[in-house]
Every structure is written in C-alpha cells, then in structure tokens.
Amino acid sequence: MKTRLKRRLLLSLAFGAAVFIALTVIADAEKLAAAFARFPWGYLPLLLACASANYTLRFWKWDYYTRVLAIRPPARKNLIIFLASFIMAVTPGKLGEVLKSYLLKEVNGTPISKSAPVILAERLTDFIGLTVIVVIGAFVFEQARTVVVGFAAFFLAITILLSMRNVSLRILAVFDRSRFFRRFSRNIRTAYDSIYLLVRPRPFAWSSAISIGSWFFECLAYWLVLRAFHAPVPILKASFIYAFSTIVGAVSMLPGGLGTTEGSLTGLATLAGTPIDIAVASTFIIRACTLWYAVLIGVAITFFFQHRLHVRIDDIDIDAVNAG
C-alpha cells in the first residue's frame, strides 16, 4: 500500500503533539502557560521574517545549483518547486526534499539521478554552514569542542573525497564489480557527475557562504525569542544552541528532528541559565516559526499550484519519491 503524504503529515503532527505534551509535563503546564502569556507576540512578524530570510537564501542556493547543472526551469516554476518541497520538512533527515527532483522531472523532464545530487549538495553545505556557527560558539564559550571539530572534519572529508574525481571514480569502479551495484552503475555515475560539478571550489565556497548566512537568520530568530523572555543568553551562545540542536535533529534521522531538536534546545538553554518553563516556551515558539511554518508554506504552495507542478497532492507517494 502506498504511503500517502497526508498520512505521513498526520503522523508527524501526532509525533509533534507527543513531544509538546512531554515537554509541557517537564516544564509544568501552569508555568508554561504563564510564560506564553508573558511573551510579547509583537515579535512574531520579526521571527517569521528571519525564517523567510533563511528560505530566501536557500532558494538562491537551489536556483544557483540548478543553473550550474543546466537543469533550471523558468524562475517562477523553480520557486514553486522549492517551496513545495517544504511539505517534506517533517521527513527523516529532510531526505524527502528529493521531492524537488521528482517535481523537476515532472516540469522539465530532468532525470532524478541528475538532479537528486543537488539535495545532497544542499544538505552538505547546510551542515557546513551550521557547523561553522557551532564552531564559533564552541570556541568562544569552550563547549563541546571535540564533538564540533569531529563534525567539521567529517563534512570536510566528505567534500574533499567527492571533489577528487579520480579517487571517487576508482571507488565506484570497485562497486561496479558487485552484481547488485552494477544494476545501478549508470544512475550512480550520472549522480556523481552532478555532485562533482557542485563541490568544485567556486560553487562549493559560494554555497557554503550562503548557508552560513541563511542559518544565521534562524539562529537570530531563536536569540530574539530568548531576548523577548529576558533570558540571559548572548547571541553567539544562542546561535551555538540553535545550530547544534539543528544538527542533532538532522543526524537523528527522525522526521523533522522531532523530539531530538526540541530536547537539545531545551536542555542547552537550561544549561545556559534559562528557567525550564522559558526554555520550553522558547523551543515551542522557534519550532513553530521555523519547522511548522515551513510545512505550512509547503502545504499551501503544493495545494494552490498543483496544476503548474503537474501533480496532485493526494497522489504524492512518499515511498516512491524517496526511492527516486
């Protein structure tokens, strides 16, 4: 039986509700309600503007990548494809964003094997952007330096390996000896040809710089939430907390990082001197203004522009999309 998008979204909402209930119990419901009552909701447009700035810069990166690979559709349709993929923000590790490749194929016939590496390059540069922010915070506040350096070394090693064409092709040749992998050899090499173009020094440096800027806007939003509560957390530490928690959520491979991201945000904010009720309230607000705001955008765009995408929202099969 196909796994329908609506069913997956409902399950994610249920999971999110469970996380909300668990943290509410931890924070004490009455104190949490009082914290929400004290929050100056006039900050909300500013928080959504910061999240929107993140999305704008990330679209710039997506648009740039599709131009590098010469698979870019008209600008309006490319924007619709990018925003529609937000509906998959609550999939494990955001791997469901391969929906962009699926929609690109529907719009201009680009093979998924050629465009899917763009999602890999996006995630890789996102991780690098977040890691840079975490590294700065870790060394300023002397926290988790070993873990952070390990993350940085890991992503740098992957990038270097992908950029070394001869070495990568030799590794692929080894896999070609396997009867199982031989069946996918053509698609794998097509995918590698695409990723190689995206990790060359110029596009990689440019995209990583965009990623640092885009994710800093969400870090800024988190700091603004804490500041609105008068929590004693400076902007660099708030950025460290948010970026580190986002990485933890992505690495957990849970849908949207649900549970792990919220737990990390709450725990680290508490360690930074924020009362538990304020830490939990801040977590709920920032996640609503980033993760769930993105999902809402994705649902709206997909619903209203189905005819332009040549796909019905009710017909989207997540398992088929993830399988490519």
Image (spheres, rainbow, N blue to C red):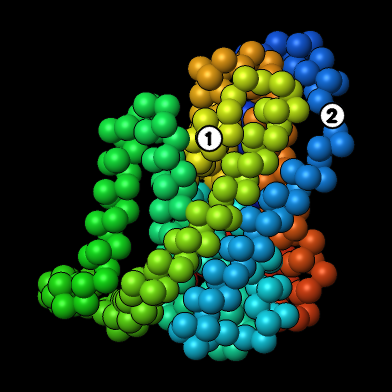
Q: Residue at x 46, y 53 (%)?
A: 129
- Figure quadrant of residue 282: top right
102 relative to 136 in the view: left or right: right
Judged by depth in the image, the label closer to the viewer, 2 or 1, is 1
Q: Which amino acid does label 1 sit on?
A: Leu
Query: Where residue 271 sits in the image (x, y, percent)?
Result: 51, 17
- Figure quadrant of residue 58: bottom right
Query: Where residue 146 sits in the image (x, y, percent)?
Result: 28, 33
In the picture shown, does residue 64 fall above or below 83? below
In the picture shown, does residue 44 fall above or below 170? above
Q: Which residue is drawn at 82% across and 69% down?
A: 304
Q: Mark 2 points at which residue?
A: 40
The residues tagged by marks 2 and 1 sit, at their Cα atoms, a distance apart of 22 Å
Secondary structure under badge 2? loop
- Residue 306 seen in the figure: yes
Q: Which of 140 and 94 is in front in this view?
A: 140
138 relative to 185 in the view: left or right: right
Q: Nearer the viewer, residue 188 or 142?
A: 142
Q: Residue at x 24, y 56 (%)?
A: 157
Q: What residue type is labelled 2?
A: Pro
- Residue 317 seen in the figure: no
Q: Nearer the viewer, residue 243 or 300?
A: 243
Q: Residue 206 carries which label?
A: none
Q: Residue at x 52, y 66 (%)?
A: 98
Q: Disc 2 or 1, which lies upstream in sequence?
A: 2
Query: Where residue 219 sits in the image (x, y, percent)?
Result: 59, 42
Q: Is mark 2 in CB contact (under 8 Å) with mark 1? A: no
Query: Where residue 48 sits in the image (x, y, percent)?
Result: 76, 48
In the picture shown, does residue 164 fall above or below 158? below
Q: Residue 236 carries which label?
A: 1
Q: How crowded is mark 2: few (under 14 residues within 10 Å), some or many (20 or more)?
A: few
Secondary structure under badge 1? helix
